[in-house]
Structures are given as structure tokens and as C-alpha cells.
Image (cartoon, rainbow, N blue to C red):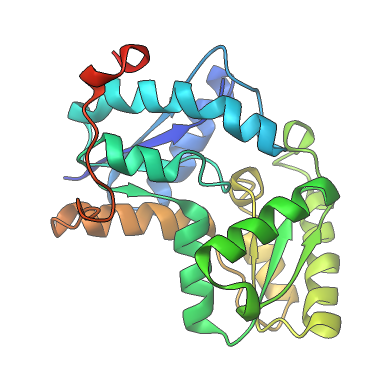
């Protein structure tokens, strides 16, 4: 059995929400998934590059502390917070949901659309696309106007906004596939509702990231030491 840590940068969730996401995650994959909040003193959500930067140190410390307990780590944020330093710090495979989802979208469609949470996060998404080398394959990034901490996972209003925004992405931008660029949108688990109302694939980042992590762990795939030269935590007092 493969054990995966779904590591949430920042202070994470209440115990009820952490348990809910853990139930959802374990329904999505045959692996055993534990949702881990990284840092009680970190940001409560990541909606800016400042939030992202402030979340990295605590995420690294927590990853180092739990590394021996898990076969793989999934970064619990679509910003792929701290992905590169995490891969340098730990020996188990580390999967970023955005990286995994964007690569999958590019495999199933010539051009894909990205639905993010807020207008202010659109530049962050574009920066990620550039770093991943997929700017030209993205038909556009659109906001569904849903602050992370205000997302109601039981409300159909959010799903309706994703349908309306996704429809415009297909019709006006030429997107041949879509995905929600936020793990809170993903864990709303409204994908069937949305997919039934669109005529293009609607990808689920949580499923893609967890299944990739499980596959890598089962087959002994991990990040290359040449691309991600290992760093010893003992060389950094703040990581001990």
C-alpha cells in the first residue's frame, strides 16, 4: 500500500475540513492519503505571491519532519508552493498539482483553459504557465470570483459559476479542455456537474496529482538528483 501526504502550505484547515478533504482524497485513489497542515503560523490561504513566499519555510520544515512516514508528497496548493525546494530537500517523490494537471491538459487537448479563483491570481497563473513552458498551449486564464476561504463546497452556486466561466472559455477563448486552478475548487468535487454542462474535458487536479504520486511511488520514480541536487537539512538550522 502506498501512503501519500497531502501537504497543505500555510496554516491549512479546521479539523472538520481537514477530515473532509482526507475522505475525498481517499475516495479518489487506491493509495492511503493523509491531509497534513504544514504550519499553524503560516497564511490561512494562498492568494498572492506574498502568501506563497511566506508559506514555503513552514512547508519545508513539515515535509522534512514527515518524510520518513510517507512514500510520496503532494503539494496541497495549485500554486505548487515550494515544489522545487521540496524536491531538493526530501528523497520521496513530490508532485505539484498544477504541473501535473497542465501536462495532462496538454496531452488531452491542443489548447486548454484555466479557471482560477480571483482576478488578482491571474498573473500568478500566467507566471506558472511561463515557468512550465505551456503559455502558448493555454487558451486563457479566467476567474470565477471565489475567495478561497469563502468557498462553500456544498453550494451549487460555485459550480454554476464554473460552468458559466468555462462556457465562455470554450466559446470565446477556444479552450478544448478546462481545469479549476485551485485545490479548494477541486475539492468542491463539482466536476461531474460541471462536465455534464460543458462539451470539453473538465480535469480534476486532486485526482491527477494523487494518482501521479501513487504511480510514481509504486514504480520507484522520483525526482532526479541532477535536476534537484539534494540539500542536507542539517546544513540549515531553520529546517532542523
Residue at image position (40%, 45%) is 84
Whether residue 74 can be seen here: yes
In this picture, residue 168 sits left or right of residue 13: right
Q: Residue furthest left?
A: 220
- Point out the image quarter for the C terminus: top left
* Displayed quadrant of residue 69: top left
31 above or below 220? above
Identify the residue at horizontal 79%, vertical 33% (top origin): 150
Question: In the depicted view, which residue is nearer to us: 79 or 206?
Answer: 79
On the image, the x and y values in percent for residue 42 come to 58, 18
Percent x, y of residue 55: 55, 27
User: With respect to residue 91, does 63 lie above or below?
Assistant: above
Q: Residue at x 53, y 18 (%)?
A: 15
Quarter occupied by the N terminus: top left
* Residue 16 picture quarter: top right
What residue lies at 77% left-to-right and 56% top-to-bottom? 159
Q: Is residue 54 above or below residue 95?
A: above
Amino acid at each position: 500500500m502506498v501512503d501519500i501526504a497531502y501537504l497543505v502550505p500555510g496554516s491549512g484547515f479546521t479539523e472538520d475540513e481537514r477530515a473532509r478533504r482526507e475522505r475525498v482524497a481517499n475516495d479518489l485513489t487506491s493509495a492511503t492519503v493523509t491531509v497534513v497542515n504544514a504550519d499553524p503560523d503560516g497564511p490561512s490561504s494562498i492568494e498572492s505571491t506574498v502568501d506563497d513566499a511566506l508559506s514555503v519555510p513552514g512547508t519545508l520544515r513539515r515535509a522534512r519532519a514527515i518524510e520518513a512516514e510517507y512514500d510520496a508528497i503532494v503539494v496541497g496548493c495549485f500554486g505548487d508552493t515550494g515544489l522545487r525546494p521540496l524536491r531538493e530537500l526530501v528523497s520521496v517523490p513530490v508532485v505539484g498539482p498544477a504541473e501535473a494537471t497542465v501536462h495532462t491538459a496538454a496531452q488531452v487537448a491542443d489548447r486548454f483553459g484555466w479557471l482560477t479563483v480571483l482576478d488578482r491570481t491571474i498573473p500568478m497563473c500566467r507566471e506558472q504557465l511561463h515557468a512550465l513552458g505551456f503559455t502558448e498551449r493555454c487558451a486563457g486564464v479566467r476567474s470565477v470570483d471565489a475567495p478561497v476561504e469563502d468557498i462553500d463546497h456544498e453550494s451549487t452556486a460555485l459550480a454554476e459559476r464554473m460552468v458559466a466561466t468555462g462556457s465562455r472559455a470554450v466559446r470565446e477563448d477556444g479552450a478544448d479542455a478546462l481545469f479549476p486552478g485551485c485545490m479548494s475548487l477541486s475539492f468542491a468535487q463539482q466536476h461531474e456537474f460541471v462536465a455534464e454542462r460543458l462539451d470539453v474535458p473538465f480535469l480534476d487536479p486532486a485526482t491527477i496529482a494523487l494518482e501521479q504520486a501513487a504511480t510514481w511511488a509504486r514504480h520507484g520514480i522520483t525526482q532526479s538528483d541532477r535536476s534537484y541536487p539534494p540539500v542536507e537539512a542539517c546544513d540549515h538550522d531553520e529546517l532542523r
